[in-house]
Image (spheres, rainbow, N blue to C red):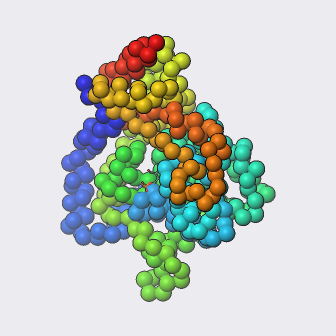
Amino acid sequence: MFVPLYDFERHVGVLEKEIVSSMHSVMERQDFIMGQEVKELEKQIAEYTGTSFAFGVSSGTDALLLSLMSLGINAGDEVITTPFSFFSTASVIARLGARPVFVDVERESLNLDTSDISAVINEKTKAIIPVHIYGRMAKLDSLINLKSDFDFSIIEDVAQALGAKDKNGMAGSVGDIGCFSFYPTKNLGAFGDAGMITTSSDELAKRITSLRIHGSSDGKIYESIGGNFRLDTLQAAVLLVKLKKIEEWNNERLKLAKNYNQFIEELGIQEFVRTPRVLEDGHVFHQYVVRVGYREELRNYLQSKNISTGIYYTEPLHLQPCFQYLDYKIGDFPECELACREVLSLPIFPGLKVEEQSFVVENVEQFYKNKK
Ligand SMILES: Cc1ncc(COP(=O)(O)O)c(C=O)c1O
């Protein structure tokens, strides 16, 4: 048996005809940039997330960059975020000359520990970027409360969490701006790079509209300096077909996560493999991540049994060489640093079979038995 970390064919395969026909219509119409499907996708994502506006953009990274630009963030400003995320969550801040300010994560959820924010927030703080890591929403209540004392915006990094929700609403609708990635392996993945921004602010919507196309609303007069952050119609055509399935796929991911937790419990190996909490709904399990010891050895062992695994992330952002100038050091964010040593992603994707899951867990058990 070979268990991949992700298998595109298994869930996209069933939609292939519809996707090809949709791409064909784009070819016929030739509205390749920001065409009909982009507008329709924006409408549907706004409806789905419960926001007033959605803007198709070129990637999740560009969604974050454009969001910061729309808030006018630049040199001298500070933006608070997590050191436990994909690189671009922090790099976009630095690209605008602003300073990334990191705050440690919670041990259990690995989301931003919002109780630590009051120690670093100040009048230079222009935005906070919580990341809904692995598909589980970060707690935003205390951030929202801080807004009465400080003037900052909340940009949700929803790259891994389309469809996640909590008592405050859908991911991407609770903060001022939501940034989505449709990188091919995301819960909703394009056939290339693509992303989306959501907001319910008229003012931000106006600025995003202009900055997305070089800083002009009519293509003649450039009121500011934006960029080319447009979304291709072909990507939107693919995404629109797949979007119909997002709830079904997210529910399947939740079920698969429950299965893993159950198998691990049944084999009594929780002592070696710490499982994630399965929230009844709301968590869309972009990744199913366990915390383990002997991680590299376990990975190699599983690889020898034809089981692929992943690690997100091996390096904390505050210790990346490019952020040396920020003067962080080892030990500054112990929960993040520990997570980087322990996290391991097991295969999870729509179409993964129960037999494959038990094969994975049995092999994990075998590894720790051999270790004793
Ligand atoms: C948390 C997070 N933020 C931002 C991004 C960037 O998205 P993209 O790869 O579409 O630029 C990703 C995707 O890898 C991500 O996982």
Residue 125 lies, with reference to residue 219, above or below; the image says above
Counting the numbered discs, the total is 0
* Residue 150 vertical position relative to residue 131 in the rendered view, above or below: below
Q: Residue at x 58, y 40 (%)?
A: 337
Q: Residue at x 51, y 32 (%)?
A: 342
Q: Position of residue 368 (x, y in %)?
A: 44, 17
Q: Is residue 113 above or below residue 30?
A: above
Residue 23 in percent (x, y) is at 24, 58
Q: Is residue 137 above or below residue 344?
A: below
Percent position (x, y) of residue 219? 43, 83
Whether residue 25 sits left or right of residue 209 in the image: it is left
**Viewer-proximal residue, 158 or 163?**
158
Q: Give the image quarter of residue 124.
A: bottom right
Horizontal side of 180 relative to 234 (left or right) equals right
Q: Residue at point 70% right, 51% down?
A: 144
Residue 33 visible here = yes
Q: Residue at x 32, y 64 (%)?
A: 233
Viewer-closest of 13 and 193: 193
Which residue is at the front of the view, 334 or 197? Answer: 334
Farthest right residue in view = 149
Residue 42 seen: no
Q: Quadrant of the N terminus?
A: top left
Whole-percent x and y of residue 29?
24, 69
